[in-house]
Image (spheres, helix red, strand yellow):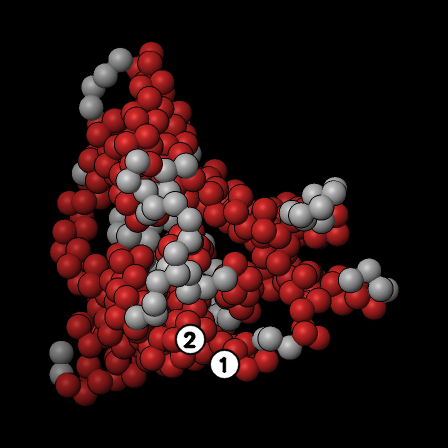
């Protein structure tokens, strides 16, 4: 390929993925549909079969699927530089927009006159998480063994206080071994649950109980997001479970309210939802925190595409890799169940009778119905929750 042709292809990639990163609302499925329209139908850079192969390949590695497809397309169209240009250009608009929201949030978010809007936004965000859990669960829980794996992960995280990363990998390896090892099917679920309870009891003995605030470290912030990005199977919403476990429960660098706000901001920004890491990083550590968090969460996707591209056909034919992927995906469902329950308690619970916030519960139920049954966009759900809170405040309810 001549240098002029290569440069022209890099410019094409930059233009396309900057555009997609700027207008890419609607989550990874919408992103992938836009990419197929642009790359396969309009520009014919890839055949439809090749594009479908990329979708299957990205399901075998951690990280955001739509971002990794962009990276793959860049690599196939313009080599190593294309890989970098496509990935960075797809991520950059979301990161910059999220950074702007983070700056405004830190500067203005503490104003008491904005608090009533958050009252309505929180149950809407809870409904968005429930919708994501419902969709992922329907796809991931394929049989009783995988259902049992999800229960084991819930036990490990909820009762034994095991790290989300450890629980995810344990669930993946346990499921892989159980799915691929010959055994008596009559008692398989009972055996799995007994194994899970045994693991839970053993790990609980060494688990740290309670929240202990750890002094802030920029290095630890980046390292934590790097670890999360390296094991993030199951889609962007699973990120919420990792943030809850790492930054709210373990390190104490983030409050439950800030987590809700981060999720809400994520619904207003285009591009990959993992740009929420930019928001979290800025809230915790300013511009340096935003930079290291963004690099940490996205860098593994580039590395995995580079390392696994040559061996993807072999992995796709491997029954062991397929079993591991199934078990990891259903383990991610377990993580999301735990964080959804935690968010529901924080959002809908009250310290006094009747112990349930009726208006917040109604907002959450209505938003969940609109999301699950009628596929209403998350942006409209968040705006609707804020509007109901504004009306309730105007009527004197809040």
| Residue located at (34% from left, 27% from top) | 197
* The image quarter in which residue 252 lies: bottom left
Q: How many numbered marks have been drawn onto this rendered protein structure?
A: 2
The relative height of residue 111 versus residue 256 in the rendered view (above or below) is below
Q: Quadrant of the C terminus?
A: bottom right
| Residue located at (17% from left, 72% from top) | 80
Classify residue 227 as left or right of residue 314: right
- Secondary structure beneath disc 1? helix
- Residue placed under numbered mark 1 in the picture: 103
- The answer, for residue 21, to whether it is visible in the render is no
- The answer, for residue 15, to whether it is visible in the render is yes
Find the distance from the CA under tag 2 to the CA under tag 1. 8 Å
Tag 1 or tag 2, which sits nearer the N-term?
Answer: 1
**Residue 366, horizontal then vertical, whole percent:** 70, 49
Residue contact between numbered discs 2 and 1, judged by CB atoms under 8 Å: yes
Q: Nearer the viewer, residue 44 or 186?
A: 186
* The image quarter in which residue 373 lies: top right
- Secondary structure beneath disc 2? helix
| Residue located at (62% from left, 52% from top) | 347
Identify the mark at residue 282; answer none if there is no mark. Answer: 2
Classify residue 353 as left or right of residue 201: right
Q: Quadrant of the N terminus?
A: bottom left
**Residue 3, horizontal then vertical, whole percent:** 15, 86
């Amino acid at each position: 390929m001549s240098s002029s042709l290569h440069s022209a292809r890099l410019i094409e990639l930059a233009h396309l993925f900057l555009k997609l990163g700027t207008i890419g609302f609607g989550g990874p499925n919408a992103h992938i549909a836009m990419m197929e329209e642009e790359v396969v139908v309009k520009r014919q850079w890839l055949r439809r079969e090749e594009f479908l192969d990329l979708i299957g390949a990205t399901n075998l590695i951690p990280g955001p699927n739509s971002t990794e497809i962009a990276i793959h397309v860049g690599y196939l169209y313009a080599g190593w530089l294309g890989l970098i240009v496509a990935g960075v250009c797809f991520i950059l608009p979301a990161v910059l927009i999220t950074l702007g929201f983070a700056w405004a949030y830190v500067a203005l978010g503490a104003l008491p006159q904005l608090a009533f809007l958050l009252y309505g936004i929180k149950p809407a965000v809870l409904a968005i998480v429930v919708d994501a859990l419902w969709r992922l669960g329907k796809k991931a829980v394929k049989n009783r063994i995988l259902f049992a794996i999800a229960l084991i992960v819930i036990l490990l995280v909820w009762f034994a206080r095991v790290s989300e990363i450890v629980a995810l990998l344990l669930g993946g390896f346990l499921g892989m071994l159980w799915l691929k090892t010959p055994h008596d099917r009559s008692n398989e679920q009972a055996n799995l649950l007994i194994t899970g309870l045994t693991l839970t009891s053993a790990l609980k003995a060494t688990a740290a109980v309670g929240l202990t605030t750890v002094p802030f470290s920029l290095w630890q912030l980046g390292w934590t997001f790097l670890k999360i990005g390296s094991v993030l199977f199951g889609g962007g919403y699973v990120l919420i479970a990792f943030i809850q476990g790492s930054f709210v429960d373990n390190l104490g660098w983030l409050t439950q309210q800030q987590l809700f706000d981060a999720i809400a901001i994520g619904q207003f920004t285009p591009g990959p939802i993992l740009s929420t890491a930019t928001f979290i990083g800025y809230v915790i550590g300013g511009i340096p925190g935003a930079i290291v968090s963004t690099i940490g969460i996205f860098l593994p996707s580039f590395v995995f595409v580079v390392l696994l591209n040559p061996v993807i056909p072999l992995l796709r034919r491997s029954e062991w890799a397929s079993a591991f992927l199934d078990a990891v995906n259903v383990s991610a469902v377990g993580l999301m169940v735990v964080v959804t329950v935690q968010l529901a308690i924080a959002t809908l619970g009250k310290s006094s009778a009747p112990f349930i916030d009726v208006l917040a519960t109604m907002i959450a139920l209505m938003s969940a119905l609109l999301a699950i049954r009628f596929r209403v966009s998350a942006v409209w759900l968040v705006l609707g929750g804020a509007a109901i809170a504004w009306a309730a405040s105007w009527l004197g309810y809040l």
